[in-house]
Every structure is written in C-alpha cells, then in structure tokens.
Amino acid sequence: MKRKHLSLLASLLTVLFVLPIMVSCGGDETSSTSNTSAVSQIVSEESTSSRKDVKDNLPVKDFGGRDFVIFCRTEHKYEFAESETATDFINDVIQKRNDIVEDRFGVNIKTFDVIGNWGPHTDFFTTLRSHLQSGEDEYQLVAGYAAIIPAMISEGIFQNWKDIDYIDLDQPWWSSDLNDELTINNKLFLLTGDISITLWENMCAMFYNKTLAKDATLPDLYELVRDGEWTYDKMTEYARLATKDDGNGVVGKEDTFGYISAKTTQVDIYQDAFDLSVTQKNSQGVPEFTMNNQKTSQAVTMLYDFLCQSDYTYTDFTTTVETTADQEQYTMFGEGRALFIPARLQWGEYINQYQIEYGILPMPKFDVEQTSYYSSSIDNFSMVAVPYTVQDTEFVGIITEALCAESYRNVVEDYYQTILRSRYVNDQGSAEMIDIIRDGLKFNFGYIYSYTLGWPAHQINICINNNNADFTSLWQASEDIFKNNLEDHLKIYLD
C-alpha cells in the first residue's frame, strides 16, 4: 500500500493515545525515576528531530488582517479554534498554531460551527447550502464529516484542490494515500492530513486485557504480531480460552467474554484489516466495485460464526437514555470482563479511568498469507474542501497549507512535551504496535463514498446485523443500484 508519512499525530498516536493508556497505576520511587528518565530521553530525541526544520514553499505575504473563516462541525471545532468541549491543553496548542499563521500572514482565523455529527449531519449540510446559495464569499474552508461530505461533491459546490495554488500534496503533512484514492481525472475535492486531529483520534486498534491474557496462558501477543502470526483465527482461539461463566448459567454482561463489540463500525473495520477493497481503480484510473468476491464471502462467514454464533462474544450493546453503546463497552472492558475489544485509539482516554492493565495490538490479519497489518480510521474525521463561492483561491491555498504545515511542525512537539512530561513509559510493546497500526492505515474510495452510493461498503455490516452469512445474495440484490449511483457521482470527475 502506497503511503507517505502523515505526521501531525503520527508521532502523537504513540504519545496521546498509547502513553496515557500505559500510565503506571503505582510503583516505588525507583521505578518512577527510571520511567521518568525514559520519558526524558524520548522527549530529547523528538526535540532534536528535523520536524521543525521542514520548510514549506509559501511566499512572503501580508493579507492586511483579512478573516479566514472555516465552516466546521461544533463537535470538532477544537481542530481549528478554542472550544468548550476541548481540554485547556488542546485549546492552547491549536491557538498557538493559529497565532503563528496569523502573525506570519496578517490574517484572522475564525470559525463558523454547526452541529454536524451523525444525526444532525443533515442540518450541517442544509445550513452550508443555504449560506453558499447567497453567493457571498463568507467561508474560505469547509471541514466536514468524512462519511457524509462526499455526497455534496456532485452538486458542484466545491473547487478542485488541484487548481489551488500553494497546496503541496508532496509534503508530509498531507495524506497522500487518501489523496491518491480520491483523485480521479486529476480532480480532487477533499483533503485530509495533519490539519485534522480527528483523523488520528479515530484510528482503530485491538485493545486487550493483559491479566486475562495471562490467566488464559496466552503467548506474548506482541511477539505474535512481530512474527506476522496475529490472525483472525488466533484471535478467535484466544477469545474462547478467555471466556468464563460467572456460574449462574445465564449468558450476560456479568460474565467474562473473549471479545466484545457493538455491531456497528466495529464490524466495518475488518474490511481494511482483511484488505477487502470496496472499489479499485481500473486501467483508466476510475473506481469500480470489486467487493463481491470469494474472499469477502469467506470473511463474512468468519465474522458471522464468531459474532453471531459463538459463546465467546458479547455484542448486545445499545444506546439508552442513561448511557451510550460506546460507554457500555469501555465500562465492561475497563471492569475486566473482556479479553479483546476493537476500538478507536481515543478510547484509551476513557479506559484509563479504570484500574486495568492492558495493551494495544493492530487489527488481526485475514490469514498468515496477508503480508501486512492494515487499519482504519473511523469515518468521523474531518476532510476539508474549498466552497465554489471563494474568489481568492491563492489566499485559501496559502493559509490552508500554512495551518497544516504548522500542525506538523509545532503541534506535535507541544503534545510530546506536555503529554510525556507526567507520563510513565512502561510498555514499549504497545508503542511499537501503534507504529504498525499507523503505517497500515488504509483509505478506499468506495468506503469514503459509501453513504453517498447507497452503503455498498456496509454490506458486511448489514449481513452481521441481520444474522445473515450470505453476502453474495445481499450484494447482488443492490448491485445495480450501487453501480448506477457510482456512475452518477463520477460524472463530476469525468466531465
């Protein structure tokens, strides 16, 4: 898989999400001193890196106090400006980045935020459309929900990033893998990279309970990963060994399970883990559906047998007035009643509330023949676009590039210095695993466009939720719809 280094939170992943996960729950002064020394060494090594020395290709420019306004989701406003939902630290580092860009180019970075996560996402885009219909050049950048914003591309309301001067896609702060996947006929309407903290917060991994692994006499799971033998079969085998009945004869959340997850995006992430592409580009560089094949059918059978038929899994999580399905899951895991849970790396922040020793692994391979470990970022991250109302595209190109570059150069350094300052490094294995997860991050046109195309990338999920292992029949029932939708949405690229 082609992938250049995406760096703002590339190193941040090892720090922000892993090191808090690995915080020592206790220890004597000697171990504390030793761990603090290790932290100091890492900070020193990172601080002497060449990250801050990477130059952009931006000109000397003073825009005389012009406003640069970003239309963004309220829930993730913290990516661009101070937010009540963010910690003081997040607000500080983002403001520091903005100050650098504002001083350098004589601009004022502002946001206009609208609630826009799943559910209210329709209101987000309705509001955006109504503002753009006025024709006024109000917003220079739109930062939208990655799963939903592709639906707006065919409306012709976004400009081609390839036509925006000073956006340098060869720089390490942009996601070259996603950019390559979403570029068709030299047209690219959406970008992501170090400007989007949410890209990394939503990266998926397999958390595991070290105590339960030891009780089940499992081998060193880190070593299993290193040897290329961490597979789905191994995971299901170990889940069976770790499952325990509490003695009342009734299967429920009070028992200890080998594996827990909701039947939501935690099912979807196996598509990337198993290297199943919804679409692939043909010889003309145009995406075509390639998902309906023998390997996909085999994968569905594997997931069905494990998630729907085995006694080693618990998947009955629902959102209620009192709690969400996510909260139910990390509570159950945090209380020590599950060996494995597939989760966003950000969940480490919540699991750290519990006294549990755990580690992180990449998602398992389909089988030992698979050459690499692959990972997903849950599609709630932000992708940025330039609305058609923008008149001065040079202005947008310069400031957008500057924000992404400063995120690369400075935000990550502040994260290292602050997060590491009071953290203990006691699990280098998990840190190594995060590097593997990060390096295996995959993107796919068909998955990014799934909502827009009628959910082709979610057919595996639909099978599992319907207790149905017949993927081929399900796909064939909607295949013509998928193809027609794809043809329609490709027109703006191919015209």
Image: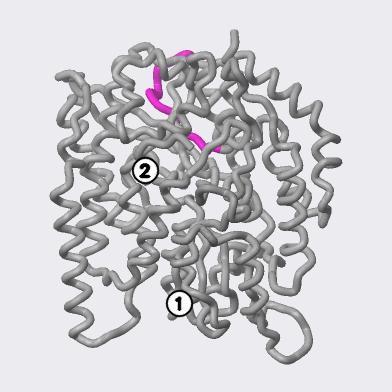
Q: Is residue 82 above or below residue 398?
A: below
| Image-quadrant location for residue 63 | top left
Q: Would you place residue 368 above or below residue 153 in this image?
A: below
Residue drawn at the location 49% of the way across and 35% of the way down: 144
The structure's colour scheme is one colour
Marks 1/2: CA distance?
28 Å
Q: Residues within 10 Å of mark 1 (few under 14, many from 20)?
A: some
Circle number at residue 238: none
Q: Circle 2 is placed at which residue position?
A: 79
Q: Which residue is mark 1?
A: 354
Q: Is residue 161 left or right of residue 416?
A: right
- Name the kind of residue labelled 1 in the image: Tyr
Between residue 183 and residue 230, name the one nearer to us: 230
User: For the residue marked with disc 2, what is the amino acid?
Assistant: Glu
Q: Residues within 10 Å of mark 2 (few under 14, many from 20)?
A: many
The C terminus - image quarter: top right
Which secondary structure lies at badge 1? Answer: loop
Q: Is residue 31 left or right of residue 3?
A: left
* Mark 1 or mark 2, whichever is nearer to me: 1
Position of residue 210 measured from the top left corner of the image (x, y, whole percent):
48, 77
Going 21% across and 32% down the picture, which residue do you hit? 101
| Membership of 140 in magenta stretch | yes
Percent coordinates x, y for residue 457 in the rendering: 67, 39
Which residue lies most toward the top here? 495
The residue range painted magenta reads 135-146
Left or right: residue 204 compared with residue 103: right
Instruction: Indicate yes or no whether the magenta region holds residue 17.
Output: no
Q: Earlier in the sequence, mark 1 or mark 2?
A: 2
Residue at left 41%, top 31%?
176
| 55 w.r.t. 362: above or below | above
